[in-house]
Image: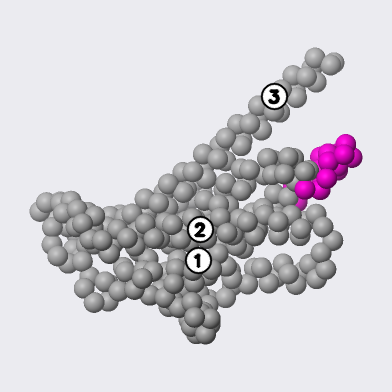
Amino acid sequence: MKTKIAGLILFLYILIISAPSIISACLAFSPDSFLTIPTNYWTLKWFIEFLNQNRWTDALLRTILMGLISTFSALAIGIPLAYAMTRLDVPYKKIIHGALLLPLVIPPIILGMGALPMFYMMRMNGTPLQIILMHTLLVLPIIYLILKVKFESMDIQIEEAARGLGATLFQSILLITIPLIKPSIAISGVAAFVISINESIVAIFIAGPANETISTISWSQLKHAPTPLIAVASLIHLAIITFGAISIYLIMLIINTKNKTITHKETNKSFVNI
């Protein structure tokens, strides 16, 4: 009985989560010029229209590019931050840790409203740099938390042994630590990229005509002229998210396979020694 109830709850959960995505995907194939689920026949004309409109294709490429730049920028900041917070004696560590997590708890609408006049005073309004900076700020906590957990689970004696053999701190980090955390770097990077390209609230506030993203155009079209082009953009977003989820799953699968292989080899060595 309990198994059936658990199965029913799981089914309802999957249905609630997947239903909006399925409906959105169906809308992209509608032959009509407004958002309706196709009943008579399905068409690819809105996909062709999407590719033929420079505004949409430019926004898609711009969204991906800014997402990549934001992700690599956050990685460049997050890796040394996570290392310092777990390995070094940093003053005011708890305060810094709390400050790094603030973007996770502050509503995006407040960040967007505050960022708009701030970038205007800095004469950065209307440039892609403002979106990159804000997205870097938003995804940095995710990267920081994932890598901090990884650093805390690592055996510090490996690094100490390398330094005991004459390696400098920088050499031990570059040659020992970084290779060991590559999977975590990849996972946090993929997660940050997906979050960046899907962020819309802050982008709506600060994006200008020259740095529109897929999310900002979709919001504008939804308010004034909702067409299946919005559904096409949503489907592309869904495809990117799915790719990110599959990438994370494959990385974790590779990690588990390697760990099992190492454990198996160590077990065989133990039997040989016995």
Give the foreground label among 1 and 3: 1
In terms of secondary structure, what is the magenta stretch mainly?
A: helix
Disc 1, SS: helix
Residue 103, horizontal then vertical, whole percent:
59, 71
- Residue at screen point 42% across, 69% down: 200
Calculate the distance from the C-alpha at mark 2 to the C-alpha at mark 3: 40 Å
- Relative depth, front residue between 32 and 209: 209
Disc 2, SS: helix
Please tell me whether residue 169 belongs to the stretch shown in magenta: yes
Residue 85, horizontal then vertical, whole percent:
76, 60
Q: Is residue 110 above or below residue 10?
A: below
Q: Which mark is residue 256?
A: none
Q: Is residue 38 visible?
A: no
Q: Which of disc 1 and disc 2 is earlier in sequence?
A: 2
Residue 163, horizontal then vertical, whole percent:
86, 42
Q: Which of disc 3 and disc 1 is earlier in sequence?
A: 1
Q: Which quadrant of the structure image shows residue 15? A: bottom left
Q: Residues within 10 Å of mark 1 (few under 14, many from 20)?
A: many
- Residue at screen point 71% across, 60% down: 81
Calculate the distance from the C-alpha at mark 2 to the C-alpha at mark 1: 7 Å
| Region in magenta | 152-170
Kindly identify the amino acid type of the residue bearing the numbered disc 2: Ile
* Residue that carries the numbered disc 2 in the rendered image: 69
* Residue that carries the numbered disc 3 in the rendered image: 264
Q: Which quadrant of the structure image shows residue 60? A: bottom left
Q: Which of disc 3 and disc 2 is earlier in sequence?
A: 2
The chosen color scheme is one colour
Kindly identify the amino acid type of the residue bearing the numbered disc 1: Ile
Give the foreground label among 2 and 3: 2
* Residue that carries the numbered disc 1 in the rendered image: 132
Q: Residues within 10 Å of mark 2 (few under 14, many from 20)?
A: some
Q: Is residue 172 above or below residue 144?
A: above
